[in-house]
Image (cartoon, grey):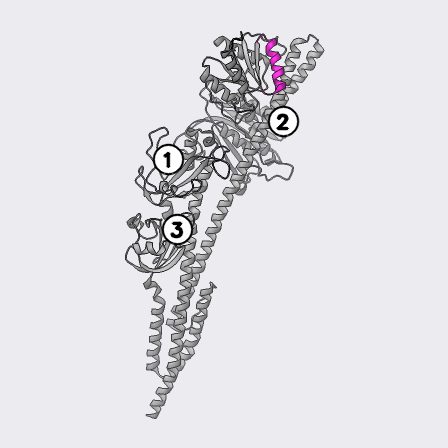
Amino acid sequence: MRTRTRFLLLVLSVLVPSFIAAALAVAYVYRDAQQAQDRSMAETARAMALLVDNELEKKEELLHALAGAPSLERGDLVEFYQHARRAAPPPESVIVLFDLDGRPLLNTRRPYGSDLPPRGSSNIAQLMQHQSLARTFVSDLFVSRTTGGRDIALQVPVYGATGNGNPGGRPIRYLLSLGMNVASLQQLLGRQRLPAAWLATLMDRNGLVVARTRAPELYLGKPVRDTTRALVRGVQETMYESRTLDGIDSRVYASTVPGADWKILLSIPRSELRQAPLRAAALLGGMMTLLLVIGLVAARRFANRAIAPIDALGRSAVALGTGAEVRYQPAGWAELDSVAHHLADASTRIRQGRTEMEARVAAAIAATERAQSALLKNQKLEALGRLTGGIAHEYNNLLQTLTTALQLAAFTTRDDKVKNLIQTCQRTVARATTLTGQLGSFGRMQEARRTTVDLCAQLRSAVQLMKGSLRGNVAVEVHCTDDVWPVTLEPLQFDVALLNLAMNARDAMPDGGVLRLEARNITIDAGDAGAGPALARGDYVLVSMVDSGSGMTPEVMARALDPFFTTKPPGQGTGLGLPQAYAFATQAGGTLVLDSIPGIGTRVDLYLARARDAVTAPPGVADGAAPAHGSGTVLFVEDDALVREAVLRALQESGFEVMVAEDGEAALRLLETLETLETGKRRPDVVFSDVVMPGQVSGIDLAGILRQRYPGLPVILATGYTEQQIAVPDVQVLAKPYAIEQLVAVLSQAVVQD
């Protein structure tokens, strides 16, 4: 008996401390695992809220990019409509432009010019009643009237010219809205690879389900429980116990989406949370039963085998709580090994999830930085175009003065030596005119220089210019198919684009090679994506330049069209050749497509829109021809004093009676004076005006005003360079510097037609 009692006491003396140690270990593991799980829930919910916010920011950046579109600033809603449809293709997305009274001006899900319904079902109008229009608005979930799908909408302001409408000094002109189907947000949640039992729900301000990782088709658009709305209202983050819409009791962590005031609800079933303590209780029961049956020896073996693994579990739990790696080390005890294995597996999943989340956040940040960098480069290119265009305008005014003065001198002298000197000067001015025209490579295509050309003839002419820049070991082949369609372009810019491409090909073939140029007709259908999504369906002329050089790597080709990007050593490249060619192609109604294989060569395709007009015959004026003669009264409007003085005399020498005005306002005042006063002077037969002038009335504005006030009065415009679109009907445009014979012929024709 004593032996049994002693044995029992011995067993109890072993079992009780072991039981206490096991209970403490289980409690410690449970507590730390629960805390780690709570932290993991919080981090996951915050990360998903940031992912949703980043997705909305991308759409906001798209809206801001569209709001800054030049076509919208000019008020060209037709061009902006096409641009918006390309940027956000319907029906998944829709761009809607509103005026400040909330009336829709265009809707990319409907044809341009069609009757548009009032503002849709979104609650942005209600949000605008309580906040400034100068901010970005994100709507709650609503049903689209056009598609019947569930959408959300974002809205940004569009600012007009400088004024006092806001702290930035610019008034709000329009309101630009982007509507998008919530399927993209549903896909975003679905890509997060949450554990099967976990549930992530995206809820809007009204408590409606915007997206859901489990059975979204059943609960999309349904309201969450009233208790849930009450618990998360007015707080940024919170944790609480609740029941999901599909009836599962869960612990929920709520985190706020910063830019939209929506909520991410991350739910984990209580049954899954209780698995760890249940496994620990089962382990403890098994341990006690085993010790009672086996006795002292089993108790000693249990002590030797259980205490160390339990301590290891405690250390693993601490490591799991700190985010350190937990490795699975078998202890020879099935229950303890199972817990250790699950701890190691949980550690691996948490670390992988954290690593993946960090990688996604880093990728999102990198994408944003790339978008900002591309925007900055485009702004630099636009600034370069404005700068060079302004310089071209000033130089063309100087060249106009020289051209006119030299022509007058040639008309008035009979000395052959003087005429030879004058012809030398005229050739120099013509060369300077060509160089000045190259300054406009990055600006708007100038209407005055646009002409419809035979592309094959223009291509062969450009090849002659190109050969002077190529080495003798580069063979040039030109292939033009029969009946190539005409195209409308600036011939000089076409030559410059091909020259830039040829110089790139030359540098890629240091040991010589073959440079092949081809031109052929091509028709792009609706489903043809061979030239990229930026190319609309229609007829084009495809000009291809193929070299046998070193080619480009995918990394270099991805940045080849970026302004100022070059792989050449400092001083040997500007990084503007390919961007200039791309700018020319887009101005000509097409695009540029680049393809390259390292070690094989590079192919550049220029798609140029087919012209519907006939080929324009180049004007020809014989050198030393007698001065043209005209008649009638001309109102000459020019702000540059030198140009005004030279052209005034040339017109008078040609037989015209000339009235002079220094700007658009002065010209309007002069015409009003001729109508109201008995001056004995009659109204001019034709108005000849510069385009770019100081004051409130440019040449284009003057032409538009005269079309309204004096419909029968002909108007001729002249320009050296302008960023404005000349859209006044029946107005002929001359490019500076123009020949006096050309000017006299145009004015005489206008007087006769009048």
Q: Earlier in the sequence, mark 1 or mark 3?
A: 1
Q: Residues within 10 Å of mark 1 (few under 14, many from 20)?
A: few
Up/down of 93 relative to 433, above or below: below
Instruction: Say if the magenta span includes residue 506.
Output: no
Pick the front one: 721 or 420: 721
Q: Residue at x 33, y 38 (%)?
A: 120
Residue at point 60%, 22% (across, down): 396
Give the number of the mark in front: 1 or 3. Answer: 1
Graded by Cα atoms within 10 Å as few (under 14), some (14 to 19) or many (20 or more), the crowding at tag 3 reads few
Percent position of residue 656, x then y: 57, 9
Residue type at mark 1: give it.
Gly
Number of other residues with Cα within 10 Å of mark 2, as a class: few under 14, some 14 to 19, many 20 or more: few
Q: CA distance from mark 2 to mark 3?
A: 57 Å
Quadrant holding the N terminus = bottom left
Report the residue marked by disc 1. 102
Indicate the amino acid at tag 3: Arg
Q: Which residues are magenta?
A: 639-656
**Can you identify the residue that label 2 sits on?**
468
| Comes first in the chain, label 1 or label 2 | 1
Quick check: 451 above or below 265? above
Q: Nearer the viewer, mark 2 or mark 3?
A: 3
Q: Is any part of residue 326 visible from this angle?
A: no
**Outermost bottom residue:** 2
Q: What x and y, as percent, mark residue 104? A: 37, 33
The residue to which callout 3 is attached is 191
Q: CA distance from mark 1 to mark 3?
A: 37 Å
In this rendering, the label closer to the viewer, 1 or 2? 1
- Tell me the distance, in whole angstroms, between the alpha carbons under discs 1 and 2: 60 Å
Residue 30 position (above or below residue 661): below
